[in-house]
Amino acid sequence: MEAIIFSTILMLGLGLLFGLILGISDKFLYVKPDERMATFRSMLPGINCGACGQPGCDGLTAAVFEYKGKITDCRPMKPDQREKIKEWIKTAEGPDGTTLDLSKIT
Ligand code: SF4
């Protein structure tokens, strides 16, 4: 009987401890999502053709925001669309308050 009570208390204690660790980790390690990515993705043609060398429009979006791809990689994009994205990028601030370096993605 003592073993059951001890095991129950031990499991409750461990549950509380790990819950507390997860709660604290969530508070301090939370990475704010970059809302600009959804907007950027919506400005692409959305054909998912892969002509940019990425696995679809989502891939190019991720690549641009990691400075591994360029807006100009999207071949089906019309020049006026490209200019519109460039203008938007200049002023769109990320979670840290900075804007993308346009010279690295065009
Ligand atoms: S080339 Fe443009 S339309 Fe095609 S997958 Fe890449 S971003 Fe999407």
Image (spheres, rainbow, N blue to C red):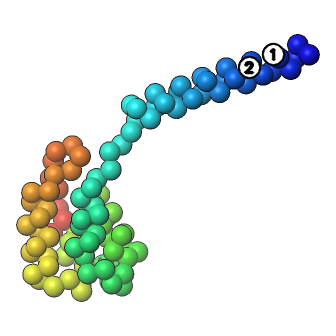
Q: Amino acid at mark 1?
A: Phe
| Residue at the spot 16% in from the left edge and 52% down from the top edge | 93
In this view of the protein, can residue 97 be seen by the observer?
yes
The quadrant where residue 51 appears: bottom left
Looking at the image, residue 33 sits to the left or right of residue 14; the answer is left
> Residue at label 1?
6
The quadrant where residue 4 appears: top right
Q: Amino acid at mark 2?
A: Leu
Would you call the spot at circle 1 few (<14 residues within 10 Å), some (14-19), or many (20 or more)?
few
> Residue at label 2?
10
- Give percent across and percent down for residue 29: 40, 35
Relative height, residue 91 to residue 59 (above, below): above
In this view of the protein, can residue 69 be seen by the observer?
no
- Give percent across and percent down for residue 33: 32, 50
Helix, strand, or loop for circle 1? helix
Helix, strand, or loop for circle 2? helix
Tell me: is circle 1 under 8 Å from ligand 1. no
Would you call the spot at circle 2 few (<14 residues within 10 Å), some (14-19), or many (20 or more)?
few
Tag of residue 21: none
| Residue at the spot 33% in from the left edge and 74% down from the top edge | 57
Asked if the residue at tag 2 contacts the one at tag 1, i.e. Cβ–Cβ closer than 8 Å, the answer is yes
Quarter holding the N terminus is top right
Looking at the image, residue 105 sits to the left or right of residue 68; the answer is left
Relative height, residue 37 to residue 9 (above, below): below
- Give percent across and percent down for residue 76: 24, 86
Relative height, residue 96 to residue 49 (above, below): above
